[in-house]
Structure formats: structure tokens, C-alpha cells
Amino acid sequence: MTPGLRQKYERLLGILRELESVIVAFSGGVDSTFLARAAKDALGERALLVTADSETYPASELEEARRLARHLGMRHLVIETRELDNPEYAKNPPNRCFFCKEELFAKLGPVAAREGAAHLVYGANMDDLGDHRPGMEAAKRMGVPAPLIDAEFWKTEIRELSREFGLPTWDKPSFACLSSRFQYGDGITAEKLRQVDAAEAFIRSLGFKQFRVRHHDRLARLEIARDELARLWEDGLRDAVVERFRELGYLYVTVDLQGFRSGSANDALGLLRTIPSPRRGEGQGERR
């Protein structure tokens, strides 16, 4: 560990110690796993992991979160969130993630009270400050700190230290909830989420690591990392994808020539004249 990273990590531990006891919103991604490790180092048994299970969270990720909690040797709870019950979320506006985080933190509050945890924390990092992240506004309004931002951790640094700590997530591909597979304004339903989840599970079973299946009604737009794209044209692989996607209800299957792009749904934001203010009841629409 370089002296600079050592100093930054010690700063993170100090921030967590000042919180005295925490619940880590734990998705099992790169950031929340790193934050969980830091919380354990800083607080020991006064750090609890809680994962929110819902239709937007793939079953494979839930099992991964459980495995990671065991790897870390930390207590882990799973709660249910129901963001789809909120019609403002289901409309899928640009501020959709605001309602997701609002639901998450609202459900974590009673858990914190029951478990005697003084604070909730979540895994946003410095890279998130330069992107469209309505969920961060919900965290700010509800007083939920992001220690990785407070300690000024960037994603590359999180991956570097995760590797040094032996965390299996150090090279885990970027992940976002299944709702991010839909274009803003395309209403989200449990049926659509299951369709996308099954499509992505099939692509994953073929050995692809970094990809997204973007849902466009009867058309599936497949984003795959450029260094993996050539594998689609291996014998039988392309045809297998088309066949499986047809079984799932897609009439057309396309490959995005730009390859995988995290947050590519945000490309459309420039076409929208306004983004509604994320206030309750005004019709506005990420896991770390």
C-alpha cells in the first residue's frame, strides 16, 4: 500500500470511528464491499451489513452478497424493499433513483433503531460526483453519509486496495439495479424486470463478464465490453443468444457497436428539456 493510500484509508477509518456504530447498505458491489471491510476494521461488531432484496435486484447478486458477508466475517441481514409500489418510481423518470434510495433508507431506519446502530452509510465514491446520481440527493436529504466521498476515495483506488486486502470484488464488473436497463419514461414492471434478469443470466452463463441487456419493448440491445465482442460470433454463440432471447419474448436482438457503457441510459438526458425536482408527489422519477 502506498503511503498516500495508507493515509487515505486511515482517514476513512477515522471517519467511521466517529460514527460509533453503522449499518452499511450492502449490495455486494465493489464499493459497498470495500466500505464494509473498512467498517469492520474501524468498528468491529458495531458494523452491520444489510442488503435490500427486491424485484430490481437479481437473485444471483443476493447470493453473492451473502457469500461476501461470510467472507468478511460480518453479521448480515436481508430486508425487503418495494420500490415498484411507488408509482413515481415505476414511471421511470430521470430521477427514478431518488425514490429507490428513499425507499432503501426509509426501510433501513427501523433496522438501525432495532439494532442500536447510530448511523446508516452507503458506498458512493468520488467518481459518482460527476454523473447523474439522483439517489445521492435522497441520501443527502435523509442525512445518510457516504464515507468514501468524505475520505475522497476514487474507484481505481477502491479497486487497488480491495485487491491488496484480498477482496474478491476487486475486479468485479460495474453493477447497477435492473431498472437501469430501461430508457427513461419506459414504465417498469416486475414482468419486464424478470425478462431482463433472465436475459442477463443467460449472457452471464456464456462466460461474458461486462455487459448489459437494454430493454426497448420487443427489442433487446446487447452491450458487451469491446474486448469480449468477438466471442459473440464464435460458432453457435450468436444463434444461441437469439434463440434464448426469443424464448424470453424479444422479437429483435441487436448488438450495440459502441460496446458496454455504464450509465448509457443517461445519454438521453440531453434530449430532455427539464429534469423534474425530486420532491414527493410531483411525478419525478443505483447500487453501490
Image (cartoon, helix red, strand yellow):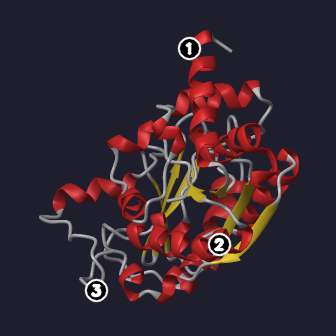
Q: Quadrant of residue 210?
A: top right
**Above-or-below relation of 40 to 59:** above
The residue under label 1 is which amino acid type? Answer: Gly
Distance from the alpha carbon under mark 2 to that under mark 1: 36 Å
Q: Residue 198: where, in percent of width, then height?
A: 67, 71
Q: Which residue is mark 1?
A: 4
> Which residue shows up at 30% across the image and 81% down it?
280
> Which residue shows up at 38% across the image and 58% down it?
140
**Above-or-below relation of 132 to 280:** above
Q: Which residue is mark 3?
A: 281
Q: Say whether residue 121 is left or right of residue 50.
A: left
Q: Which residue is mark 2?
A: 113
Between 138 and 133, the residue placed more toward the observer is 138
Q: Earlier in the sequence, mark 2 or mark 3?
A: 2
Q: Residue 229: where, in percent of width, then height?
A: 57, 41
Between 196 and 34, the residue placed more toward the observer is 34
Label 1 CA crowd tier, 10 Å (few <14, some 14–19, many 20+): few
